[in-house]
Image (cartoon, helix red, strand yellow):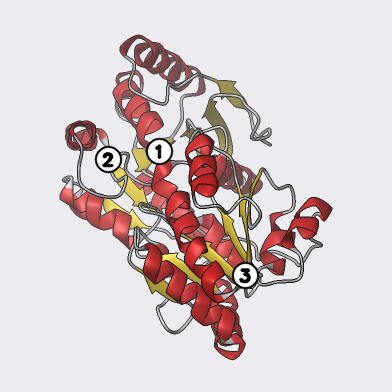
């Protein structure tokens, strides 16, 4: 068994949940695990946690402080292997390697920071250059989807890039929260689970919703999730006159209830890695419409387990949703195929075993 140190930055969302699941499972398998990253509202860990603030953007003074703190964690824990998650934690963890120069380091991008959807910005080009510069300090790039691996190879990872898809324990049906049930009403229900960042495409979904309502006047949309771009989403909702048909629900305690009640699940992202929300909707046989961003097309196979549309295309998104709302037999077939696909390919057990296999490869060397 090995001493494994996990470094992370986000305090909520998919990356945070991934680290928490991974750390707990590795500890249950007999490894000694410590996590290093900020404390916050995302919940506690079942393993020792060193509270280290890692900035979201590369502020020089704060980043230098984080590098020093992570380096101290390396020296005190003396891990056999380091696994860093995300862009900023990945940069900090690799720059701190002087404190543990011979220790193998795995980096999981969970979406590269320069992949925001659309063309590259000056900031995106800088992030890409930084990733290329940090690649020599990376023993393995452990990607959550093939789309991410292709980007890593383009950054110089070569044969150091591996893929282990995210995996889940299939959700169990649950009741819909009363506040959500009251809003949903009796008409068709479209659901989304998305943090409110621009790259998540919620304003595009709201544009699509206006067209969906033209075909299905009683439809409702509930979006579960919070984020810094809530004001942008609210403005788009109000500009389109959708306040009576769209609920930006914020945090939802029992997401299984929402996904189980949905007639169609939508992921409208402009940029993605391999979203847990899609897998959770699939596990409850909720028919899915997703964009072709990141690894979403590795979860949903167009025309077999759901619908895939071009990212940023509100008209295509609306047409696919309307199609499934109007053809319940096809929607059920897609939902059943999606649920079977999760249980065959995207289980938590496969994710943990695959990750442990990459660790074993490095530790044996």
Q: CA distance from mark 1 to mark 2?
A: 12 Å
Q: Earlier in the sequence, mark 3 or mark 1?
A: 1
**Residue 275 falls left or right of residue 33:** left
Q: Callout 3: few (<14), some (14-19), or many (20+) C-alpha neighbours within 10 Å?
A: many
**Residue 82 falls left or right of residue 35:** left
Callout 3 touching callout 2 (CB < 8 Å): no
x and y, in percent, of residue 202 in the image: 48, 51
Discs 3/2, front: 2
**Residue 107 falls left or right of residue 260:** left
Residue position for label 3: 283
- Residue appearing at x 42%, y 51% in the figure: 360
Q: CA distance from mark 3 to mark 1?
A: 26 Å
Which residue occupies the foreground of this view, 226 or 31? 226
Residue position for label 1: 86
Q: Identify the image quadrant of residue 86.
A: top left
Q: Which mark is residue 114?
A: 2
Numbered-mark total: 3
Q: Secondary structure at mark 3?
A: helix
Q: Secondary structure at mark 2?
A: loop
Q: Callout 1: few (<14), some (14-19), or many (20+) C-alpha neighbours within 10 Å?
A: many
Which residue occupies the foreground of this view, 237 or 345? 237
Q: Callout 2: few (<14), some (14-19), or many (20+) C-alpha neighbours within 10 Å?
A: many
- Residue appearing at x 60%, y 45% in the figure: 225
Residue 151, compared with residue 59, is above or below; it is below
Position of the N terminus, as image quadrant, is: top right
Residue 52, compared with residue 103, is above or below; it is above
x and y, in percent, of residue 35 in the image: 55, 31
**Any part of residue 356 in sight:** yes
Q: Identify the image quadrant of residue 137.
A: top left
Q: CA distance from mark 3 to mark 2?
A: 30 Å
Q: Secondary structure at mark 1?
A: loop
């Amino acid at each position: 068994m090995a001493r494994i140190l996990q470094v992370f930055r986000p305090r909520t969302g998919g990356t945070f949940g991934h680290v928490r699941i991974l750390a707990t499972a590795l500890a249950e398998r007999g490894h000694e695990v410590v996590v290093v990253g900020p404390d916050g509202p995302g919940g506690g860990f079942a393993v020792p946690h060193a509270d280290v603030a890692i900035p979201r953007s590369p502020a020089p003074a704060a980043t230098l402080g984080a590098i020093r703190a992570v380096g101290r964690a390396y020296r005190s824990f003396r891990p056999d292997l380091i696994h860093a998650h995300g862009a900023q934690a990945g940069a900090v963890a690799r720059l701190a390697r002087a404190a543990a120069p011979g220790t193998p380091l795995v980096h999981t991008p969970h979406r590269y920071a320069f992949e925001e959807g659309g063309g590259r910005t000056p900031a995106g080009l800088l992030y890409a250059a930084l990733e290329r510069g940090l690649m020599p300090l990376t023993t393995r790039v452990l990607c959550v989807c093939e789309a991410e691996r292709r980007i890593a190879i383009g950054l110089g990872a070569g044969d150091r890039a591996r893929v282990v898809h995210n995996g889940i324990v299939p959700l169990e049906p649950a009741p819909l929260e009363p506040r959500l049930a009251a809003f949903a009403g009796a008409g068709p229900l479209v659901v989304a689970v998305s943090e409110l960042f621009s790259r998540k495409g919620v304003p595009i979904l709201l544009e699509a919703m206006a067209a969906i309502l033209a075909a299905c006047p009683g439809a409702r949309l509930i979006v579960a999730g919070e984020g810094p771009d809530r004001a942008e989403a609210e403005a788009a909702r109000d500009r389109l006159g959708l306040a009576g048909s769209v609920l930006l629900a914020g945090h939802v305690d029992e997401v299984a209830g929402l996904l189980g009640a949905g007639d169609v699940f939508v992921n409208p992202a402009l940029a993605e890695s391999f979203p847990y929300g899609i897998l959770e909707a699939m596990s409850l046989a909720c028919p899915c419409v997703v964009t072709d961003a990141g690894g979403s097309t590795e979860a949903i196979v167009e025309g077999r387990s759901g619908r895939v549309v071009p990212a940023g295309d509100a008209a295509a998104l609306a047409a696919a949703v309307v199609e499934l709302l109007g053809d319940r037999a096809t929607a059920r077939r897609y939902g059943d195929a999606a649920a079977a696909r999760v249980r065959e390919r995207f289980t938590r057990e496969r994710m943990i075993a695959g990750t442990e296999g990459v660790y074993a490869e490095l530790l044996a060397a």
